[in-house]
Amino acid sequence: MEIPMTAIEMTGTVDEHSQLRLDSSLPFSGPKRVRVIVLSTLEDEIDEISWLQAASRNTAFAFLADPVEDIYSINDGKPFNDKI
């Protein structure tokens, strides 16, 4: 039988002993069993500038330099106004 659960999003830090330390207290008291999902950035994650530079040098996109690919002009579309 599945037990209904609620989700709480919190931040924390994993210390040098691989122990999770939350930045604040949980909104309930224990002892209580919980399930934990940890989302973390990858160690070798590439930053946006490096990714864009690599993409701009990739020969797979060389076809975009062909004038035939210029199908839009400055007169196409409508101006975007994000003011409410």
Image: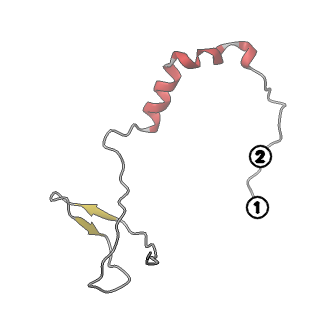
Along the line of sight, which residue is nearer the eye, 28 or 21?
28
**The quadrant where residue 26 appears:** bottom left
Which label belongs to residue 50? none
**Mark 2 and 1 residues: CB-CB less than 8 Å, in contact?**
no
Query: Left or right: 8 with respect to 29?
Result: right
- Specify the amino acid type for callout 1: Ile
Q: Which mark is residue 80?
A: 2
Pick the quarter of the image with the C terminus.
bottom right
- Residue 78 at what x, y percent from top left? 83, 41
Residue most extreme to the bottom: 29
Which quadrant holds the N terminus? Answer: bottom left
Judge whether 76 appears above or below 39 on screen: above
Residue placed most toward the observer, 17 or 48 = 17
- Residue for badge 1: 84
For the image, the number of numbered tags is 2
The crowding category of the residue bearing disc 1, from other C-alpha atoms within 10 Å (few below 14, some 14 to 19, many at least 20), is few
